Image: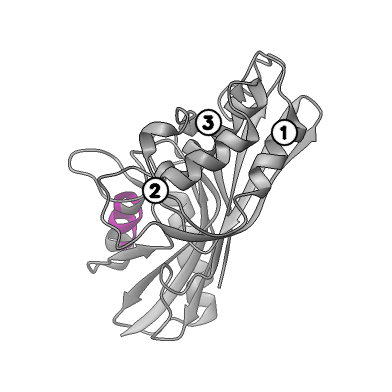
Amino acid sequence: MARYCMQLSYNGAPFFGWQIQPEQPSVQETLETALSLLLKQKVAVTGCGRTDTGVHARVYFAHFDLSANLLEADCAQLCFRLNSFLPKEIAIQRIYAVADDFHARYGATSRTYRYYVNVRKDPFVTDRSYFVGVPLDVAKMNEAAALLLGVHDFTSFSKVHTQVNNFICEVTEAVWRCEGSQLIFTISANRFLRNMVRAVVGTLLDVGRGKLTVEQFVEILEKKDRRCAGTSVPAHALFLENVRY
């Protein structure tokens, strides 16, 4: 068996997340079906992580195994054929051979997400940005976001009933920046929990609105109780931006 990695991007709007779901469309199932049909063998695809329903990925990696060795030209041809076969919401950038022990999920050392907030109503970005129609104190939001850096228990920002051994994550970047009428939140960590980024953003927006103080934000983190944190923001404005190995 030979192992291959593919780099892709996808618009998550029509999918119920990355992972295969019973009777619901997913990115993983769509890729496995396409590869199996094109290669005339059953192909299982392992992704670099789960994304929730409606979440997008600008950069995503997945691996799969084949019984045959593909040359570089074969990989390029497979990439072309896949892009012709797949729906418009999924694009394959490249396919290449990797070591047998490469693992798209467990080999990743860092992932970066961005969440896009619009502070001015704009009909042309409603499908990829969350509109917040009240003034936000970005300085306070950044003050609170900086407290996420380092190793913490993120139980307060995770779905409770999830299959993980612990809720410990190491965050290496958490910052808001302004670009015109948009606020962009960037967060990088060694791992992310289910719903984590959306819950963090929702709680930071409460700081920006003045509903929470920075001190209360810290208390929420330390309480390890999801009921204490803010409401999760919508999925359509969240993008997986990068994965490092």
- State the SS at label 2: helix
Name the residue that disc number 3 marks. Answer: 202
Point 59% across, 34% down: residue: 204
Looking at the rendered structure, the kind of residue marked 1 is Lys
- Please tell me whether residue 126 is drawn above or below residue 30 in the rendered image: above
Q: Badges 2 and 1: C-beta atoms under 8 Å apart? A: no
The picture places residue 143, in percent across and down from the top left corner, at 71, 41
Label 3 vs label 1: CA separation? Answer: 14 Å
Residue designated by label 2: 155
Magenta highlight range? 29-35
| Three-letter code, disc 3 | Gly
Residue 124 to residue 97: above or below: above
What is the x, y in percent for residue 133? 65, 13
Q: Give amino acid for label 2.
A: Thr
CB atoms at circles 3 and 1 under 8 Å apart?
no
- Eye-nearest disc, 3 or 2: 2
Instruction: State which tag comes first along the sequence, 2 or 1.
Output: 1
